[in-house]
Amino acid sequence: MEARGADPWLGVHVLTEFVFCPRAGLCMYETPEEDSGEEILPPSLDYMPRYDLRQIEDALEDVKRRLRERLLVAMGIGAATAVLAWIVDPEVVWLGMVGLVVVGWRLPALLKRAVILAWRQRRCLLAQPREPDPDSQEIQPVDWWELLHADFRSVPYKDSLVDENWRLAGRPWRVLRRGGQRIPVFRKRRGDARIRQQHLVRMVAYCHLLCVAEAAESPFGVVLFGDSYEGVAIPNSPGLRKVFHDALVEARSVVQRAQEGDKPSPPENQAQCGGCPLGKPFVYRPGITEYKLGHETLAPDTRFGEDGRCYHSHCGDRYGWIPRHKKAVDKGLRA
Ligand code: SF4
């Protein structure tokens, strides 16, 4: 498995794209991004800690403090209004009510935040220690808090793990540490609990990097589902290690062949193109939507849709074809 002279450096996330489709893998290899150990998740507009008990408790204390302050101000306004209405003019009551509305404006949002944080805190505190069987070859369900109660400590990594000999690098979302054990954690997007081949390869690749970089034992990796505490443990089994090794060898070979001018074939199952972001056509805007290949800008491979607009896609530009993406079919794009 050691890399030889012409073998490329590969990121774990790039390797998983090769597992999905050789064309996607090459596109990702040519437009490298750092591995973040999680799928692209929708931005959280109301950030609340979820996976760290101390952060949850700090945030809960902060919300409680703000609620107390608002309550005190509301009581002050109520008392002052009552006194002024009695001494000066009963019409002052209206002024007091305006003040109470202003103070209470954000109250429902704060209460909602407090309830959510309290639920997360309770979820953590009620969990019992439990961990997957490290000798099992099966995929097993896991719970984030149960793992942490089993004495694992969650550590975010800033830098990628690297295996110089295999020319492989990657960074899990978190690493669970306990003694000499290191468990990589990957986070999938919300609402999709399917485990595909690329997730298996990813987790075994992270386990390999942890074994090499930290001389650790890494018997399984954890895939968490979206913004939940549920996930599965993927065993670092001999069978899955073989799948990972084969994927790495194949990815190296696709990159080398591409460097000699040989385009990879589309995936055997072209239904994959239907939802692939690289095959999704966009309206062509000169100077804005072209894709870059290193310092070179790819000439767009544009087609007109039935709506009369001109479309192109990353995969289409790179390989000179029209992937059968759902939107391409809807728009009536043809070769
Ligand atoms: S559009 Fe199809 S061929 Fe292109 S990268 Fe996606 S899955 Fe592969």
Image (spheres, rainbow, N blue to C red):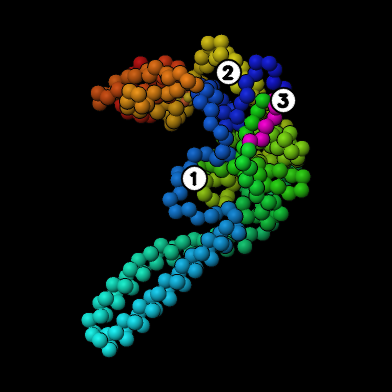
Residue 315 seen in this snapshot: no
Q: Amino acid at mark 3?
A: Asn
Q: Quadrant of residue 194?
A: top right
* 10 Å crowding of disc 2: few (<14), some (14-19), many (20+): many
Instruction: Looking at the image, tell me whether mark 3 or mark 2 is earlier in sequence order.
Output: 3
Q: Position of residue 62 (x, y in %)?
A: 51, 64
Residue 137 is left or right of residue 12, and the answer is right
Instruction: Looking at the image, tell me whether mark 1 or mark 2 is earlier in sequence order.
Output: 1
Q: Residue at x 53, y 28 (%)?
A: 32
* 10 Å crowding of disc 3: few (<14), some (14-19), many (20+): few
Q: Quadrant of residue 162?
A: top right
Tell me the SS state at disc 3. Answer: loop
Foreground residue among 177 and 250: 177
Q: Position of residue 216 (x, y in %)?
A: 75, 40
Q: Position of residue 263 (x, y in %)?
A: 51, 14
Q: Amino acid at mark 1?
A: Arg
* 10 Å crowding of disc 1: few (<14), some (14-19), many (20+): some
Q: Which residue position holds label 2?
A: 255
Is 304 located above or below residue 82 in the figure? above
Residue 175 seen in this snapshot: yes
Q: Residue furthest front?
A: 88
Question: Nearer the observer, disc 3 or disc 2?
Answer: 3
Q: Which residue position holds label 3?
A: 165
Question: Nearer the observer, disc 1 or disc 3?
Answer: 3
Instruction: Looking at the image, tell me whether mark 1 or mark 3 is earlier in sequence order.
Output: 3
Q: Which residue position holds label 1?
A: 190
Q: Which residues are magenta?
A: 160-166
Within 8 Å: ligand 1 and the Cβ of disc 1?
no
Foreground residue among 278 and 99: 99
Q: Residue at x 45, y 29 (%)?
A: 276
Q: Residue at x 56, y 62 (%)?
A: 58
